[in-house]
Image (spheres, helix red, strand yellow):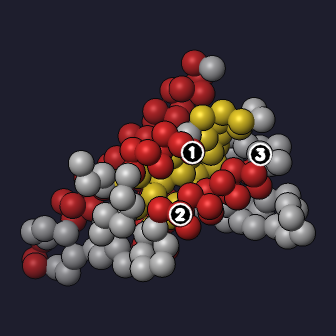
Amino acid sequence: MEREAVRLAAIGARLRELRQGRAGLTQERHDARPTLDVNDEYDVQDLLRALLGLTFDDVRPEEWTPTYGGGASRVDFLLKPEQVVVEVKKTRSGLADRQIGDQLILDAARYEKMKDCTALVCFVYDPENRIVNPGGLQADLSGTKDGLRVEVLVSPKKY
């Protein structure tokens, strides 16, 4: 349990850096270079892949899950030695509280079937503050169920 807490803390630190690092990148850049914009979920994944690589040696993007509900899907990142899956969501029009919550519940059900997954870290990037109660979403969806530890982190929080 202590090892799991350490690896989840390390991932949480990388996720917080994503928000803090992005803020620094969008301000003054060398030679007035354009900012690094985060327009969609793929942009968040690209930045996160770079940050995870600073801490973890084996970051596997887009690993397949076992079949669940008649189909398989791909995880955003698998940290295989740590047995952690990292899932990324970015809010947008039509994808806020309820939709994000529903997607994360389904993701957790899928990933608990993966033999290489004992923990799921869900990073929800909400730059437009579409999630009304980010702390509530985190509290409601974080925890342990059927042996899978789930941590939900919403950033930035509006309060």
Report if residue 57 is visible in the image: no
> Label 3 belongs to which residue?
112
Residue 37: x percent and y percent? 30, 76
* Element carrying mark 3: loop
Q: Residue type at mark 2: give it.
A: Arg
Q: Residues within 10 Å of mark 3 (few under 14, many from 20)?
A: many
Q: Residue at horizontal 48%, vertical 78%? A: 94
* Element carrying mark 2: helix
Per the rendering, the mark at residue 98 is 2
CA–CA distance in space, label 1 to label 3: 14 Å
Q: Residues within 10 Å of mark 1 (few under 14, many from 20)?
A: some
Q: Is residue 146 above or below residue 49?
A: above
Residue 77: x percent and y percent? 61, 56
Report the side of 94 relative to 149 (left or right). Answer: left
Question: Quadrant location of the N terminus?
Answer: top right
Report if residue 94 is visible in the image: yes
Q: Residue at horizontal 73%, vertical 43%? A: 117
| Nearer to the camera, 86 or 36 | 86
> Label 1 belongs to which residue?
141
In front: label 1 or label 3: 1
Report the side of 156 relative to 84 (left or right). Answer: left
Earlier in the chain: of badge 1 and badge 2, it is 2
